[in-house]
Image (cartoon, rainbow, N blue to C red):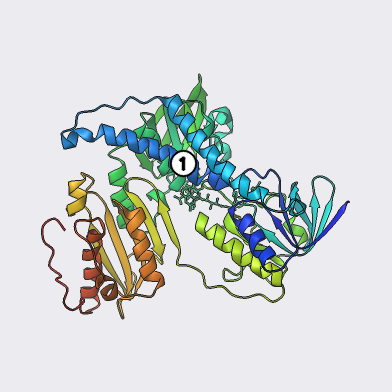
Amino acid sequence: MDELFCDVAIIGAGTAGLAAERSARSNGAKTLLIDESFGGTTCASVGCMPSKLLIAAAGAAHAVRTAPVFGVEATPTIDGAAVMARVRKERDKFVSGVEESIAKIPDDVKICARARFTSPTTLALDDGRTVRARAVVIATGASPLIPDTFDAVKDRVLTNETIFDLETLPGSIGVIGAGPIGLELAQALARLGVETMVLDKGDAVGALKDPHVAEALHAILERELPIKLGVETEAVPDRDGVRLSWTGKDSGERRFDYLLVATGRPPRLKGLGLETTGLELDDHGSPTYRTETMQCGDAPIFLAGDADHDRPVLHEASSEGTIAGRNAAHFPDVTAAERMVPFAVMFTEPSVAVIGVVPKDGAPDIAVGTASYTDQGRAKVMACNAGLVRFYADAADGKLIGATMAGPGVEHSAHLIAWAIQSGWTATQTLALPFYHPTFEEGLKPALLAICHAVHAKPPQFRDDGFLPGT
Ligand SMILES: Cc1cc2nc3c(=O)[nH]c(=O)nc-3n(C[C@H](O)[C@H](O)[C@H](O)COP(=O)(O)OP(=O)(O)OC[C@H]3O[C@@H](n4cnc5c(N)ncnc54)[C@H](O)[C@@H]3O)c2cc1C
Ligand SMILES: NC(=O)c1ccc[n+]([C@@H]2O[C@H](COP(=O)([O-])OP(=O)(O)OC[C@H]3O[C@@H](n4cnc5c(N)ncnc54)[C@H](O)[C@@H]3O)[C@@H](O)[C@H]2O)c1
């Protein structure tokens, strides 16, 4: 059969596409889910999970290396091949889990092919067939951008799509890009004994907008590995490796076995035939769309996941897929969804979180509360007393609007702050809740209290706002 008909066609079976398909089908639509490989999602195969597996191995090495501070003598011996074998073995189990859930989708829903638009509601598949749909969800994800300055050394360039396939750990690696991918993997590799250096043309680590936290985090991470900011790089082949030179705020030259290029992952929209859809495209060639409905203009086309530039993290891919799938099924009856507060975590140590709105430094009408982890009780106990947290609140009433946090346990404590912000709480309301002693969460109290003082709000009644040593 050369022509296939459905209510909703979904291009891409990643986290966003799978959610969109489930959502459209449960809303009564006949669906077709099109993917060129059904490779088990970016998250499971080359994203969240293998990176966290490598970080876990690095954490074990780091714990052994830092044990002497507690009077426990130990030295780590790192078996690079065993590290990578475990990363792949456990990664493959996550991929199998996804594949099992894909297997449960009815066979006549799944199409293994590459799709491109030939009109807003018609898709040409690379196997020669045509799909005609009432509505389409684009959930094609993103892919690594490799600047062409690295063309001369491309056989020594790794990205998140290839690094986890290394048989063993390299001797040395230059990491280009100090965003979440670059920093998470660079710190992990350094902890596993790989000579690692990070270089970024921008001025802030982790693409953080709060310059104070960015600076503090840069200084903390640099205790373990060099991170050069504000530099342009040039790479030439050098025996079985790369000679990298950099100029700008710092200059130098060094040989590496490999480069890990982590300079961003733009949406995978090339070759999708968007020019045939009549959609309005922005400067990057991405369709403009409404974040509450995921609809592109008034068209029967919806976006979800990393394909849309905004909030490229897993829980948002899943949520956007659900919104897009529901609205595609009911097109043209489209419902606006309430979006979650923006929330992203970076799994370095210290871990980092960015939540809600990050106002410009010194912005009027904003109260800022700061807390340092340098002298925090539990952090000192655990010998990880480093980090800076900054909360932003409406100066009129102390209502929390955002936070940038770098510190021990932030991947956990940031959830509480994200929940407080989404719930519309003030600093006083948040501070009125119980904080156990001695925990990392206690370290957030000075920032909340500072906001209460800044907005002349009374701290909660019947709570002691004095800080004793060790809190
Ligand atoms: C190294 C790394 C670490 C990460 N860590 C985290 C983390 O810890 N926490 C977190 O929340 N997020 C993390 N992320 C981000 C997270 O992985 C992504 O936000 C999420 O996986 C995006 O899902 P998606 O469905 O949009 O894309 P994908 O899972 O990439 O799915 C897109 C699908 O579209 C298919 N496709 C593309 N074009 C076509 C076409 N023309 N025709 C047919 N099929 C097509 C592809 O084959 C693919 O299956 C990480 C990302 C990376 C790279
Ligand atoms: N823990 C997590 O949730 C997690 C982890 C990894 C990735 N991700 C997601 O994946 C997305 C992509 O991550 P990323 O780190 O690749 O991208 P990014 O866009 O966040 O960071 C890219 C960095 O590369 C730098 N850069 C760009 N071009 C460069 C060049 N030519 N030379 C030197 N530096 C250059 C930029 O200044 C920036 O700091 C993130 O936005 C994030 O949402 C999430």
Residue 263 x/y as whole percent: 50, 44
Q: Quick check: can you spot residue 255?
A: no
- The amino acid type found where label 1 is placed reads Ser
Q: Is residue 67 above or below residue 230?
A: above
In this rendered view, identify the residue nearer to me: 8 or 176: 8
In this rendered view, identify the residue nearer to me: 116 or 78: 78
Left or right: residue 48 compared with residue 218: right
Q: Is residue 355 above or below residue 113?
A: below
The furthest residue to the right:
1
Q: Quadrant of residue 57?
A: top left
Q: Mark 1 points at which residue?
A: 51
Left or right: residue 18 compared with residue 191: right
Q: Which residue is drawn at 54% across and 31% down?
A: 165
Residue 428 x/y as whole percent: 26, 75
- Callout 1 environment at 10 Å: few (<14), some (14 to 19), or many (20+)? many
Q: Residue at x 30, y 35 (%)?
A: 62
Residue 405 x/y as whole percent: 33, 57
Quadrant the C terminus occupies = bottom left
Label 1 lies in ligand 1 vicinity (Cβ under 8 Å): yes
Left or right: residue 227 compared with residue 318: left
Q: Which residue is drawn at 75% across and 50% down?
A: 107
Q: Quick check: can you spot residue 215?
A: yes
